[in-house]
Image (spheres, rainbow, N blue to C red):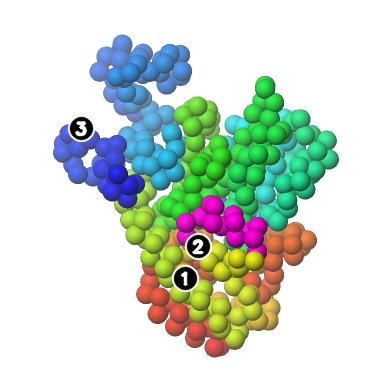
């Protein structure tokens, strides 16, 4: 069956919870063992001292290790990306930083795409480097040969351990070829050490893009965005093979950055409507993008649905990796910061806030808000100018959204 059919029931047995149709919130720190032998058996499996038997289920021990709300949520999340396993975290940053810490050690080289989410950028440049990890950024429009030359010229080519990318990239929907990155990872792998590839798929969400199918080893989400979808929870997720996720869950146990049962429960509730929400958002986004494209006060629209066929490189990546143009739109307003701010201040229905992927539409100014910390040079290279406005389109009526944008543009 398709994931949307299973989001209400997968992985949950009502008979274990008094017949409740919904998974209860298991607001408990610890779980009672029936016997001391059972407790011993659970711990042996949890600490990897022996393999789990065929009929044996992972026993519940303590909510930092496992909890039904987290496990059922993780099982449901695997369905969208056809992943073997999943780990949920208290934030997207917790998922990302845990993967980076698990895959890198002092002396290693991390290759990452730039620009990247501000929190990730800060963690890479200020935290990883503190532990002696070498970091190297590449730009979304660089070719395979250019990226390989960058790695070779870094002096740490034999230390490359992880490639971390974000595609579509925030805020202009710039694309990166995931399978090309996997080829690079393979070419720099040796028998002793495999270079792994992590893809932050937050900007597109789990419905229309499946990085694992293109060779990624990890797919990462800020579940705060489309997965949560209601601007009321901060959470994250990481998906991949059983083997890799065992490592990630191991570090999560000791960092203690797993989600709480309540957050897990909220995300399960959100997952039931993930597909209908995202489809409505993408339909609205298409209408809004078309309206913006034809407006005299708009200079340029950055929307995946508008990649021209002649731009063969990006058009090919788009066709290969994405089944929808998504619900994120950026546009250049004619003028600069003054005009952009005027527009933002005049919006009535669309809220002036960062974040994305939610039921309500949001607008913000990347150059002075989400991307304020990006260097002047990188801002320029990535079209993050004073005239750029970013929109996350929600589930409102598209006529109302267009009315709001039209009246705000009229005031500029
Ligand atoms: C929001 C976001 C994150 C961070 O997620 P949090 O849940 O805020 O920690 C990471 N990557 C991308 C692309 C994001 O948009």
State whether residue 275 is above or below residue 3. below
- The part of the chain drawn in magenta is 311-324
- Asked if residue 314 lies in the magenta stretch, the reply is yes
Q: Quadrant of residue 24?
A: top left
Residue underneath mark 1? 286
**Image coordinates for residue 193, horizontal then vertical, percent:** 66, 25
Compute the Cα span from label 1 to label 3. 44 Å
Compute the Cα span from label 3 to label 2. 41 Å
Q: Quadrant of residue 194?
A: top right
Residue underneath mark 3? 16
State whether residue 104 is above or below residue 389. above
Compute the Cα span from label 2 to label 1. 8 Å
Residue 362 vs residue 142, the one in the foreground? 142
Q: Residue at x 29, y 19 (%)?
A: 55
**Image coordinates for residue 39, horizontal then vertical, percent:** 33, 16
Residue underneath mark 2? 325
């Amino acid at each position: 069956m398709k994931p949307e059919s299973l989001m209400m029931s997968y992985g949950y047995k009502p008979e274990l919870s008094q017949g409740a149709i919904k998974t209860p919130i298991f607001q408990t720190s610890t779980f009672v063992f029936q016997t001391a032998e059972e407790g011993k058996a659970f711990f042996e499996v949890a600490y990897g001292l022996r393999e789990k038997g065929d009929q044996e289920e992972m026993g519940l021990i303590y909510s930092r290790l496992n909890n039904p709300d987290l496990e059922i949520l993780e099982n449901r999340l695997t369905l969208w990306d056809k992943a073997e396993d999943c780990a949920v975290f208290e934030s997207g940053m917790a998922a990302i930083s845990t993967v980076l810490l698990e895959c890198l050690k002092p002396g290693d080289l991390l290759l990452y795409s730039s620009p990247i989410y501000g929190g990730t950028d800060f963690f890479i440049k200020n935290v990883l480097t503190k532990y002696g990890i070498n970091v190297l950024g590449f730009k979304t429009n660089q070719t395979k040969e250019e990226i390989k030359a960058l790695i070779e010229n870094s002096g740490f080519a034999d230390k490359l351990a992880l490639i971390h990318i974000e595609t579509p990239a925030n805020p202009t929907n710039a694309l990166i070829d995931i399978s090309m990155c996997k080829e690079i990872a393979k070419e720099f792998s040796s028998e002793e050490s495999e270079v792994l590839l992590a893809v932050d798929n937050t900007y597109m969400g789990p419905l229309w893009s499946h990085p694992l199918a293109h060779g990624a080893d990890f797919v990462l989400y800020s579940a705060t965005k489309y997965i949560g979808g209601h601007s009321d929870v901060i959470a994250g997720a990481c998906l991949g093979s059983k083997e890799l996720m065992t490592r990630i869950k191991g570090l999560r146990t000791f960092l203690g950055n797993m989600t709480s049962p309540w957050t897990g429960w909220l995300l399960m509730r959100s997952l039931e409507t993930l597909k209908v929400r995202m489809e409505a958002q993408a339909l609205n986004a298409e209408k809004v993008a078309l309206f913006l494209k034809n407006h005299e006060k708009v200079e340029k629209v950055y929307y995946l649905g508008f990649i021209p066929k002649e731009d063969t490189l990006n058009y090919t990546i788009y066709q290969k990796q994405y089944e929808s143009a998504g619900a994120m739109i950026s546009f250049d307003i004619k003028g600069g910061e003054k005009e952009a701010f005027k527009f933002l201040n005049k919006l009535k229905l669309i809220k002036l806030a960062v974040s994305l992927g939610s039921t309500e539409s949001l607008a913000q100014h990347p150059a002075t808000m989400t991307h304020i910390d990006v260097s002047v040079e990188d801002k320029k290279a990535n079209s993050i100018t004073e005239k750029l406005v970013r929109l996350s389109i929600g589930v409102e009526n598209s006529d109302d959204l267009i009315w709001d944008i039209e009246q705000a543009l009229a005031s500029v």
